[in-house]
Amino acid sequence: MNAKEKSMVPGETILTGAGIAALAESLPKPVSAAAAQMVRDKIDAQAELVKVANAGKLLREWEAAKAVTKSALGACEKHLRWHEEALREFAAVEPAHLLRIVIWGFCALICASAEFALTWETLPFILNVAKRTFLGVMLGAAPAAGVAVLEVGIAAVLAACSRVMLQQMDSSRLRKCAAWGLLALSIGLLIGGNVYTVRILADAREEVAKVRRNLERQDGEAEAEVNQGVIKEAIVAVSVAVTIDGAIFLMLLMEDFKRLDRRVKIGIRIALMRRREGRLHNALHQAEAEEKYREQRWGAREEFLKAVVEEYRQECLLELQRALDQKTARRSLAEVVNDIRSSGSAGIASVDLPSRIM
């Protein structure tokens, strides 16, 4: 039996074979039968302590295995709850259609391009800067960038307003009617503004055609009267329309991107949870197997403890017997000479001295 199996009992010290040998060495010479029996009784008492210590060790190992299994089971249950919550959250997010994202993005890009085209055609000409130079392109892009910032702000405001209106749909009847009224008014204004832009652009095309005819007219032909106010009004309407429509398209694009981003993040989290789920199940299976093994050892403790106690007793008795044999064999030289003289031997040379003389 190794030293690790000889567990300590609170308040008691368990002697090993070396300790029993030291106890035997401390006995006075010659060793009497009563003294040897006293040591054997000590070995029996120590064997009972060894039995109690190893029984306690088996019980502690079983309790520790049960605690590990309980902890692993709790981790699996917590992970399962998190996984179910992530699946519910993933199902609650509306899917983002890639085709719709492409359409919204393309329309927003067209609106920004229209504003860029308007400023690129006018500002370099007014400032006498070549259009196809870096400075000319920057002059056309600067107002478009400012409009893009304005579109982002308008898109954020529209998104917040739409969320508020959607929340009011589930409230009282009055608020629901007010929300529907504001929504209808917004859609009406949007449709009216775009219809007005289309109409004014039609008038502006006629005026531009007159300008073109005036530039291409031959000598003697009358110059057509051009309404410059219509052209200016059309330019303003187009600028306002591309700004508002671009903000709406940007809002729709951002909302779809938010849904797509959220679904992607939740999907990645679910994938990581599934990978971790396998490790948690393996840990739980190992813990259950260890608990079952410790439970079996505790159930068969009588045979195990009997074997441990017997091994300890045999080891201690062997050390005791070895110590007693050495103690008996250690005789001084004076004792040997006295024995020779008392036996009346003729001389020391004819006597077989013991091989182990101290």
Image (tube, rainbow, N blue to C red):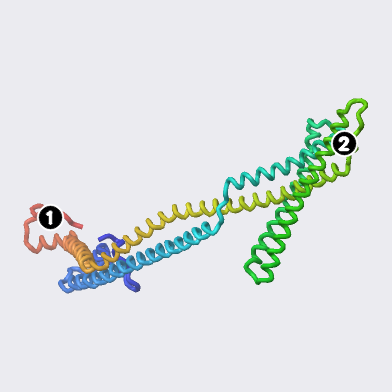
In the image: residue 91, left or right of residue 114? left
Q: Is residue 306 left or right of residue 341?
A: right
Front tag of 1 and 2: 2
Q: Which mark is residue 126?
A: 2
73 left or right of 350?
right
**Of the pair 181 and 145, the residue shown nearer to us:** 181
Q: Quadrant of residue 69?
A: bottom left
Q: Mark 1 and 2 residues: CB-CB less than 8 Å, in contact?
A: no
Residue kind at label 2, given as amino acid type: Ile
Give the percent coordinates (x, y) of residue 68: 38, 64
Q: Residues within 10 Å of mark 2 (few under 14, many from 20)?
A: few
SS for callout 2: helix
Q: Position of residue 249 (x, y in %)?
A: 68, 49
Where's residue 170, x and y in %?
62, 68
What kind of residue is marked 1? Leu
Residue with the mark numbered 1: 353
* 332 relative to 347 in the view: left or right: right
Residue occupying the point 87% across, 30% down: 215
* Quadrant of the image occupied by residue 352: bottom left
Res. 98 in view: yes
Q: Position of residue 234 (x, y in %)?
A: 82, 44
Q: Residue furthest front?
A: 221
